[in-house]
Image (cartoon, grey):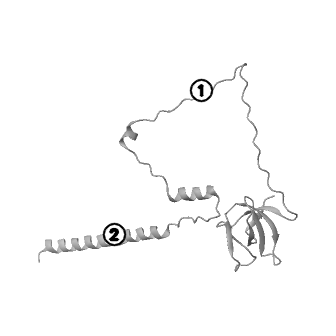
């Protein structure tokens, strides 16, 4: 065997080892990125409509599709000109809209917000074996009605509905 044959063999061997290492690293990076992506946020039946819309929009982002006509033809825009009211025309006055006042609280109840970052499960009794009847999201406003005898659970009511139930104490913070 000649010297050039040995060099060609060693060079080919080194290139083959490099390709195998590169392919292994690329495959490992691919699987690591796929396994570390967080799962989509679950949507519960008692979620607010705006939360459902945000979650659906986050899971299915709109994909812009450019057609040839859309790329070539610009869309016309309207220019609005502000008109000053004259002496003959009365200036329009906005009518105040009624803001809904919060429900009055029962004696001993107070307004609070959820401080647990993942939200809380609402149960129909003050223990973990009780049936889960709903959920409340992080930073959502609630009304704390009472505490359990052992002070480990609080009875709450959602501010935007009539759902009442029990959540673990220490995961809510008094607002007022």
Q: Is 148 above or below relative to 61? A: below
Tell me if 75 is positioned left or right of 57 in this view: left
Instruction: Give 167 or 90, whichever is nearer the viewer.
Output: 90
Q: Which residue in the rendered view is the most extreme toward the bottom?
A: 129
Residue 85: x, y in percent? Answer: 69, 23
Q: Which quarter of the rendering shows the C terminus? A: bottom right
Instruction: Give 52 or 153, whichever is nearer the viewer.
Output: 52
Q: Is 100 above or below relative to 159? A: above
Asked whether the viewer can see residue 90, the reply is yes
- Mark 1 residue crowding within 10 angstroms, few (<14) / some (14–19) / many (20+): few
Instruction: Give 32 or 127, whichever is nearer the viewer.
Output: 127
The quadrant in which residue 152 appears is: bottom right
Q: Which quarter of the rendering shows the N terminus? A: bottom left
Mark 2 = which residue? Answer: 22
Tell me if 132 is positioned left or right of 77 in this view: right
Instruction: Give 115 or 155, whichever is nearer the viewer.
Output: 155
User: Mark 2 falls on what kind of element?
Assistant: helix
Asked whether the viewer can see residue 120, the reply is no
User: Mark 1 falls on what kind of element?
Assistant: loop
- For marks 2 and 1 on the same chain, the one whose residue lies earlier in the sequence: 2
Q: Which residue in the rendered view is the most extreme toward the right?
A: 107
Q: State the mark number for residue 173.
A: none
Residue 100: x, y in percent? Answer: 77, 50
**Which residue occupies 81% across, 56% down?**
103
**Which residue occupies 78% across, 59% down?**
175
Mark 1 = which residue? Answer: 81
């Amino acid at each position: 065997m000649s010297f050039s044959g040995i060099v060609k063999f060693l060079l080919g061997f080194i290139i083959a080892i490099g390709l195998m290492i590169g392919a292994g690293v690329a495959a490992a990076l691919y699987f690591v990125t796929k396994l570390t992506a967080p799962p989509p946020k679950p949507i519960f039946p008692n979620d607010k409509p705006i939360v459902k819309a945000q979650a659906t929009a986050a899971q299915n982002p709109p994909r812009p599709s450019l057609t040839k006509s859309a790329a070539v033809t610009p869309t016309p825009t309207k220019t609005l000109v502000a008109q000053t009211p004259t002496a003959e025309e009365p200036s329009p006055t906005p009518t105040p809209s009624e803001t809904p006042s919060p429900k009055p609280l029962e004696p001993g109840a107070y307004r609070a917000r959820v401080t647990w970052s993942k939200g809380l499960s609402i149960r129909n009794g003050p223990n973990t074996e009780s049936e889960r009847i709903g959920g409340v999201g992080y930073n959502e406003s609630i009304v704390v009605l009472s505490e359990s005898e052992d002070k480990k659970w609080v009875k709450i009511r959602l501010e935007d509905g009539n759902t009442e139930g029990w959540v673990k104490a220490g995961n809510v913070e008094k607002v007022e």
